[in-house]
Structures are given as C-alpha cells and as structure tokens.
C-alpha cells in the first residue's frame, strides 16, 4: 500500500524530519536495497578485520599501518552513520528522523568526512617520507609525530562537525520538513529553513573548499615528489613495490575526493536531488567497502597477518 508524504507527516512528530530515501518497493529497488545491505556487511567485516589485525599483530605496529587502521575506523563509523537508519526506515515503513537523530547524523557524517580528508593527506606525507627519505623515516615519521597528525585529523574534522550542528540548530524550519536524501545532509537540510542561510552557505562553501583543496594540494605535492623518486629508483623490485602502494592510495584519493568535490563544489543551480543521492551513496556506502579491499588487503604484510590469524602461515618480519 502506497502512503503519501502527507500521511507520513501525520504519523510523526511535528518536529521530526522526513527522509525520502533512495528506494521504493519496486522489484528493482528491492534488489538494489539488498545489494546495499550486502555492501554494508562486507564493509563492516573488512574494516573491522583491518582494525583488529593491525591491533593484534605486532609486526604491523608502525606508522603506516596505524594510519591504515584509522582509515578503516573512519570508514567503519561513516557507513554506520547512514546505512542502518536508512535500512530501518525502509524495512519498518517509516521515513521520519528526530531532530536529535538528524543532528547526530550531521555531526558524525561531517566530522568523519573532514577527518578522512586530512588523514588521506597525512598518508600521502607518510609515503613521501618513506620513499624519498627512507633513512630518516623513523625520525621524520616517529610515533609521536604520527600520533599528533592522526589526532589533528580527528580534531579538525570534529570541529567542522560541531560548527555545522550548531549552525543548523540555530535556524528555524517551517513548511515542508522533507529532506530529499537518505540521511541528514547539511545542504539538503538548509534548503528547508525559513531563516536566511545565505551567509552560512557561503562560509560552509569556503570551509569545504579549504578542507578539500588544502589536503588535496598536499597530496599532489607529496606524490609529485614520490613519482620522481620512484622513476629514479635503480631497483626494479623497489620501484614496483613503491608504485603498487602509491597506486592504491591514489585510487582511494581519486574516488573519495572526486565524489566529494562533485557534491560540495558545484554551483547550487547545477544541483539535483537525484544526482546528490547517487553520488552521496557512492562515497558513504561504496567507498568504505572498497577502501580496505583496494588499499589494505592487497598489501602483502596485511595478507600475511591475516593468514597467521587463520593459522595458515606465519608472517615474516616487515623489514629485513
């Protein structure tokens, strides 16, 4: 039985928002919903395994794998921020989300999005130091420096999340409370406000540009130096290993930043709810599954650690 948005609004609190979602109950959409649940399950397992492997295997206790574990943790939290609520609404037949639930989604989504932007830049710097200054790696990228960089990524991301939550809470919402998304997205929420949000939208756009372009600039500079260093390597084996690691990282960066820039750096006039839903689902659902598969499990040391846990082999030392 089909229920209109007006009927949904009558079933929910007047202060709740309505999430339109991305799936109907058509056969094709039921299949796509099942596919999303499968992707969510794989992402949940893959990222959890990565975090546990790096924590349990002492041979993976170095800055590079600490950064990998943080990436997996962020991806794990990101996909858990949006998919469970979307699945619950779809299966229960409800489309509402409370104001508190909406603000919680905004905080975690924005914080994790920002933190991952900065973490990818830190990972690029780590590869730059490892390849361009291998003899000084343990001095330039020791545990203290690495810890400060990781903590800074989390803090900067959380600060952006707090600002966005504080701003959206300060605005008034009147009329339709229907959010054309499957989660509480800031830009979609602001379009429902009856308060003038133009100043905040301008500041938010500038903030997004800084959070995207500044880390991306650091990544480009780091990998420009890395590519030059790899080309100059005399060892074919070393060149291949460095190229494989860097290619995996750049693939992750390309997927994440490409989708994020498409969402947040387009003019408002060119935006459409359908496009936003499709691209948002790519980097909030698909990317968290692909990251550990592309960047982590293709790593030989991670594969050896996984084999050790399964009792199929003993991993050798990382170096020497």
Image: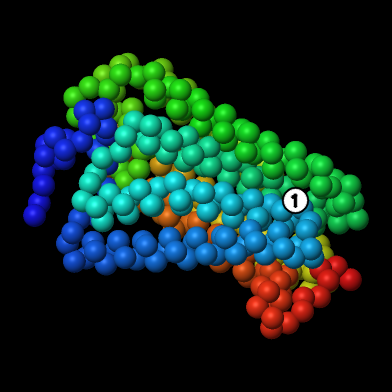
- Residue 256 pos. (x, y %): 51, 50
The relative height of residue 54 versus residue 88 in the rendered view (above or below) is below
**Residue visible at 67% across and 64% down?**
53
Q: Is residue 224 visible?
A: no
When asked about the image quadrant of residue 153, the answer is top right
Q: Which residue is mark 1?
A: 126
Locate residue 207 relative to residue 195 in the image: left or right: right
Identify the colour scheme used: rainbow
Q: Residue furthest bottom?
A: 312
Mark 1 surroundings: few (<14), some (14-19) or many (≥20) residues within 10 A? many
Locate residue 261 relative to residue 226 in the image: left or right: left
Marks counted in the figure total 1
The relative height of residue 225 versus residue 265 in the rendered view (above or below) is below
Q: Secondary structure at mark 1?
A: helix
Q: Is residue 65 visible?
A: yes
For the residue pair 42 and 235, the one nearer the viewer reads as 42
**Residue visible at 74% across and 56% down?**
64
- Residue 60 pos. (x, y %): 76, 62
For the residue pair 236 and 24, the one nearer the viewer reads as 24
Locate residue 251 relative to residue 4 in the image: left or right: right
For the residue pair 279 and 108, the one nearer the viewer reads as 108
Locate residue 56 relative to residue 171 in the image: left or right: right
Image quarter of the C terminus: bottom right
- Residue 156 pos. (x, y %): 61, 33
When asked about the image quadrant of residue 166, the answer is top left
**Residue visible at 40% across and 47% down?**
82
Image quarter of the N terminus: bottom left
- Residue 310 pos. (x, y %): 65, 78
């Amino acid at each position: 039985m089909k229920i209109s948005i007006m009927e949904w609004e009558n079933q929910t609190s007047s202060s709740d928002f309505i999430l339109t979602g991305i799936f109907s109950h058509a056969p094709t959409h039921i299949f796509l919903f099942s596919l999303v649940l499968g992707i969510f399950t794989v992402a949940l397992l893959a990222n959890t395994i990565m975090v546990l492997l790096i924590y349990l295997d002492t041979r993976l206790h170095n800055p590079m794998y600490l950064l990998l574990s943080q990436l997996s943790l962020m991806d794990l939290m990101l996909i858990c921020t949006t998919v469970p609520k979307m699945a619950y609404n779809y299966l229960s037949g409800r489309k509402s989300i409370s104001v508190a639930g909406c603000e919680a989604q905004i905080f975690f989504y924005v914080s994790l999005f920002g933190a991952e932007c900065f973490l990818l830049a830190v990972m690029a710097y780590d590869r730059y130091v490892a390849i361009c200054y291998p003899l000084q790696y343990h001095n330039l990228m020791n545990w203290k420096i690495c810890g400060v960089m990781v903590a800074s990524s989390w803090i900067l991301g959380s600060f952006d999340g707090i600002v966005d939550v504080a701003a959206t809470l300060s605005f008034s919402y009147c009329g339709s409370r229907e959010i054309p998304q499957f989660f509480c997205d800031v830009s979609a929420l602001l379009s429902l406000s009856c308060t003038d949000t133009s100043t905040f939208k301008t500041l938010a756009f500038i903030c997004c540009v800084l959070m995207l372009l500044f880390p991306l600039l650091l990544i480009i500079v780091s990998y420009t130096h890395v590519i030059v260093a790899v080309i100059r390597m005399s060892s074919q084996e070393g060149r291949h290993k460095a190229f494989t690691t860097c290619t995996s990282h750049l693939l992750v960066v390309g997927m994440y930043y490409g989708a994020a820039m498409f969402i947040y750096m387009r003019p408002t006039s060119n935006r459409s709810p359908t496009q936003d839903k499709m691209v948002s689902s790519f980097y909030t659902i698909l990317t968290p599954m692909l990251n550990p598969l592309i960047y982590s499990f293709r790593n030989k040391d991670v594969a050896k650690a996984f084999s050790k846990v399964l009792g199929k082999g003993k991993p050798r030392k990382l170096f020497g």
